[in-house]
Amino acid sequence: MHLMSQNRTIYIASIYLFCATLFWAGNFIIGKTASINEIPPISLNFYRWLIAWFVLLPFTYKELIQKKEYILKNFGIFIILGITAVSIFNSALFYSLKFTQVITGVLMISVVPVMIIFFSTLLKIEKTNIFQIFGVVLSLAGVLLIITKADIEILKNLDFNRGDLTMLIAMFSWSIYSALLKKKKYELSQITLLQVVIGFGVIILIPFYFIDLNFGNHIKLDIPFFLILIYVIFFPGIISFFFWIKGVGLIGANRAGVYLHLMPILGAVMAMIIFKEKIMFYHFMGAIFIISGIVLSNKKKLNA
């Protein structure tokens, strides 16, 4: 009976975690669709998080009022979290997909777990070991293979695709955010912490939104825009957040973390089906280096 209950728990957790990962992978597909429909990345990102903030408010307003002094006291760190997770990450991701493949994007973002180790060491949050150092080097070598398309001439002439470079910014931004989340224990529930991070991120986005409008980047209020907006607000944002928390609660963070490695696979498969993208030789070579880096960087857990 206990075994059946345990299997049921794992099964339910797997559904939650798979769906969360699928929706995050779908963010890249929708980002590409937004670029095809000429939806300005900064405006899309601004409306996405502004509306998400109001959707979350009924669930968080009591704690926001209770903890307002704590939030104001830690204003600096929340601003940095908001900038990296909300203002930069999604704006850069949506912008990059105007110029690069979804497959390239999901492979680059798959390096984030390794880059968290790099920034955790740099910011003196965690100590590292030799395996993790080699893991970081191998993963970055994989990213370099992808953005140079395994062509030495592109590297020599620094003739990079602007979408690949912007995805690099998104990758670093999310890695810094994730490392900073580990830096201290926040005296907020996870949903209220998300609300605070979104709030500060949206405030930082406001001037950039109006600058973007000033450059003539206006949104067409048509059906594709509203469908894309609904998806990015709810699926990779709010729903994935709750699904991930549920899954982690059932089977633990370490086992749940394995599901994140499905994201580049799911993203690549959807990109091949929907946009007829092809996996190139440099994607394959880059993926080998990235996977090797991820395996090496997890050696700490195996030898701890």
Image (spheres, rainbow, N blue to C red):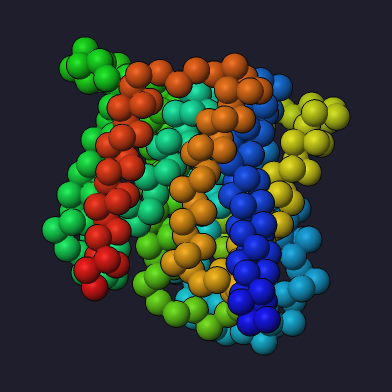
Q: Taking 47 as reference, is 154 above or below it?
A: above
* Residue 155 seen in this snapshot: yes
Residue beneath the point at 32% across and 31% down? 286
Q: Quadrant of residue 2?
A: bottom right
Q: Using the image as rendered, state which of residue 151 and residue 187 is in the foreground.
A: 151
Percent of width and height locating residue 166: 43, 33
Percent of width and height locating residue 282: 33, 22
Percent of width and height locating residue 101: 50, 23
Residue lying furthest front in this view? 1
Q: Taking 243 as reference, is 27 above or below it?
A: above
Residue lying furthest left in this view? 130
Instruction: Give the number of marks.
Output: 0
* Residue 245 seen in this snapshot: no
Residue beneath the point at 51% across and 72% down? 252
Is 224 placed left or right of 258 in the picture? right
In which quadrant will I find the C terminus? bottom left
Residue lying furthest bottom in this view? 66
Is 53 placed left or right of 186 in the picture? right
In which quadrant will I find the N terminus? bottom right
Q: Taking 264 as reference, is 126 above or below it?
A: below
Q: Using the image as rendered, state which of residue 262 and residue 104 is in the foreground.
A: 262
Q: Using the image as rendered, state which of residue 208 and residue 160 is in the foreground.
A: 160
Is 9 placed left or right of 282 in the picture? right
Residue beneath the point at 47% across and 33% down? 105
Percent of width and height locating residue 167: 44, 35
Q: Taking 267 as reference, is 185 above or below it?
A: below
Residue beneath the point at 56% across and 35% down? 267
